[in-house]
Image (cartoon, rainbow, N blue to C red):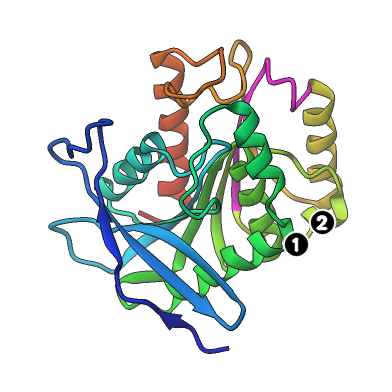
Amino acid sequence: MRLIFAMTLAVLALGPAAGQVKDGEIEGKKIKVVSGKLGYQALEFVPLGKEGPFPAVIVVHGDFGLSPWAQRQCSRLAQKGYHVLALDLYRGEMPKNIEEAHILGRGLEEDRVIKQLSLAIDRLSKMTEVRKDAIGILGWDMGGGFALDAALADKRLKAAVNCYGRLTTDPKKLVAMEASLLCVLAGKDLGTSKDTIKQFKAALKKAGKEAVIHVYPNAHHGFMDPDSPYDDRGDAKTIADAWRRIDEHLAKALNR
């Protein structure tokens, strides 16, 4: 199918709630992509003052949408030299609390999201400023689960990072994965128990696959986002260490 790219609609400000962009931060440009009956909207962050082609990272937001915090993480990655494409699965809606986040999340069709992510890979693969052999994906919460699912569905992804998202425990599905996978998990995450992690490791072994799995024993679900409505947010040291692991993984897997 032929992709139709809409013109840039707007430039969204990053940073503080007041809408001011901090020094060094990169603004995201809103785009809309349509292919037949399928499409998505997203923010795109491009490294400034550097020459491409760049490795690329697709960012899949967590339960609370493409929030200011999520946008700052996209800016952070762009500053490190990645072409970042952050899908807005909620299409502009921003949940005000955990209940609204769960309603919006449950309203997503998983198969449709995976197709949208494939469409995003299509777009990046055809851009001259992107290295098509160096495309990765990163997600938090539900976005982490989608990042893993996308890595199972699309062999063009060379790196995947699942931050406290759901884990696939079916070895038959894991066989298809070719991306280098990092899982950043929380030891006190009620949604990902020790048994689930154990089953995931066993499934990887049975499928003949490997992954880097790091569990922060005292961390809770959503710990990387200090703005998260979840009660137990991570401390600065733990968050910094998680980012160190993510940075190292992406750099190695995408040959930066």
Query: x, y percentage for residue 35?
Result: 55, 81
Mark number displayed over residue 176: 1
Q: Nearer the viewer, residue 87 or 91?
A: 91
Q: Which residue is mark 2?
A: 173
Asked if residue 186 lies in the magenta stretch, the reply is: yes
Please provide percent x and percent y for residue 191.
Answer: 74, 26
- Crowding at mark 2 (Cα within 10 Å: few <14, some 14-19, many 20+): some
The boundaries of the magenta stretch are: 180-193
- The reply to whether dot 1 and dot 2 touch (C-beta < 8 Å) is yes
- For numbered disc 2, what is the local secondary structure? helix
Asked whether residue 75 is drawn in magenta, I would say no
Q: Position of residue 27 (x, y in %)?
A: 24, 50
Up the image or down, 232 lies above or below 42; here it is above
Identify the residue shown where x is 55% and y is 53%. Answer: 89
Q: Indicate the secondary structure of the residue bearing disc 1.
A: loop
In the rendered image, residue 197, in percent from the top left (x then y), is placed at: 77, 29
Mark 1 is surrounded, within 10 Å at the Cα level, by few (under 14), some (14 to 19) or many (20 or more) other residues, namely some
Residue type at tag 2: Lys
